[in-house]
Amino acid sequence: RQKLSHDNWDYIVGGAETETTVRRNRLALDSIAFRPRVLRDVSRIDASANFLGRALRLPIVLAPVGGLELFAPEGGAAAAKAAQEFGVAHMLSSVCEPGLDAVAQAAPEALRIFQLYTRGDADWVDSMAERAIAAGYGAFCLTVDTAYYSRRERDIAKRYVRASRV
């Protein structure tokens, strides 16, 4: 938090509208509890998983975040490299730089998933899917809710307009 501008911090921790979904997600996570089991043999713990035909060190997928370049100069490439190094999956947002081809080159061995915000016609969507396949992405996800930056009350309250909205 100390290294980010107030606006970028609000973006990464906030959510759309009144952030009801953010609160509900937090409550859902807080409702999960681990039952302690003591005096057990933990010398051979294996948390690995198989996902989309690939072995993962942990059953984790780094979620797609548009604008990762606000937090690290390499943007989505940095996240994909970290996922590759740690043995987890990475989902790249189509509104994240440096784009699907550069991210594929940065982390060729990572299990990469491409998430597309649909803003074009069927031919455009097909061409994006073909690019993702050619770049070796393991899966392709379509986001069909909106191609616009969401209404965020944090931004409205401080009269902040993200450069991508201008």
Image (tube, helix red, strand yellow):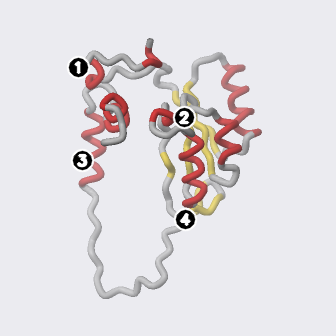
Look at the numbered disc 3 and give the secondary structure of its residue.
Answer: helix
Spatial CA distance of label 4 from label 2 is 23 Å
Sequence-wise first label, 3 or 2? 3
Q: Are marks 2 and 1 in contact (CB under 8 Å)?
A: no
User: Residue tagged by mark 4?
Assistant: 57
In the rendered image, the vertical position of residue 142 relative to residue 91, given as above or below: above
Look at the numbered disc 4 and give the secondary structure of its residue.
Answer: loop
Q: Residue at x 51, y 51 (%)?
A: 61
The kind of residue tagged 2 is: Ser
User: Residue tagged by mark 2?
Assistant: 93
Which quarter of the picture shows residue 42? Answer: bottom left
Sequence-wise first label, 3 or 4? 3
Mark toward the viewer: 3 or 2: 2
User: Residue tagged by mark 3?
Assistant: 27
User: 10 Å neighbourhood of mark 3: few (<14), some, or many (≥20)?
Assistant: few
Q: Residue furthest front?
A: 3
Q: Residue at x 27, y 18 (%)?
A: 156
Spatial CA distance of label 3 from label 2 is 26 Å
User: 10 Å neighbourhood of mark 2: few (<14), some, or many (≥20)?
Assistant: many
User: Residue tagged by mark 1?
Assistant: 157
Which quarter of the picture shows residue 96? Answer: top right
User: 10 Å neighbourhood of mark 1: few (<14), some, or many (≥20)?
Assistant: few
- Which of the two residues, 17 or 72, is positioned nearer the viewer here? 72
Sequence-wise first label, 3 or 1? 3
Q: Residue at x 27, y 71 (%)?
A: 35
Look at the numbered disc 2 and give the secondary structure of its residue.
Answer: strand
